[in-house]
Image (tube, helix red, strand yellow):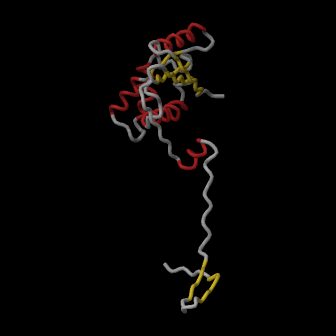
Amino acid sequence: RARTIEPTNLMMSSDGVMMVHARGPKARPVEPPPASPLDYVMKYSNVSAVQLKVDRENHYSLVVLGAAGDLAKKKTFPSIFQLYLGLFLPANTSIIGVDDPTFHSDITGTEDFWEKRLRPYLEKEKGWTPHDMEEFRASLSFVPVKISETDTVQALDRQIRELGKDRARDNRVFYLALPS
């Protein structure tokens, strides 16, 4: 593809060689680095994570309150499943679904939670193998909790402690998938 460039200087040497000097398009300025990692993710939609050694010191619990509800089954857990598939969750992460049994009386334990709420929605996700689904299921548990009853909250605490009993640190993240 031909381009026209305007000459900026014309010179003739003593031996008869004509020299034309022209400036091309201005060089593009170099973009400054993103202000934060989130800016990078938003701009390039790409994240890479590498765990170089096995973490034997920490245990991570991701506790989803309101886990048996519509938002959690359609959005929250499929998103967590995608994080799992992308290897963005530490290998030693337990995912604990929590909900009030008075609102969801059909969910009494982990098996009900998996079969009646999660599996049908997670199977719609792309990029998984049966082995992935089995491993994700193994990291999952469900605890019925009535926030107003301290013994059910204490039962949740005991379960989380049991999951991380062989680790020095117990790290917990609570996600509220609850209506306002």
Residue nearest the observer in this picture, 3 or 124: 3
Q: Is residue 119 above or below residue 56?
A: below
Q: Residue furthest left?
A: 130
Q: Residue furthest right?
A: 180
Residue nearest the observer in this picture, 93 or 28: 28
Task: Residue 109: tell me if it is visible.
Answer: yes
Residue nearest the observer in this picture, 173 or 6: 6
Instruction: Count every numbered label the image shows and give the total.
Output: 0
What's the residue at 58%, 28% (across, down)?
177
Picture coordinates of residue 6, whole percent (x, y): 62, 82
Q: Residue furthest top?
A: 151
Quadrant (top left/top right/bottom left/bottom right) for the C terminus: top right
Picture coordinates of residue 54, whole percent (x, y): 41, 26
Q: Residue furthest front?
A: 14
Task: Residue 121: tell me if it is visible.
Answer: no
Q: Is residue 107 above or below residue 50?
A: above
Residue nearest the observer in this picture, 3 or 83: 3
What's the residue at 42%, 28% (across, down)?
53
Which image quarter: residue 138?
top left
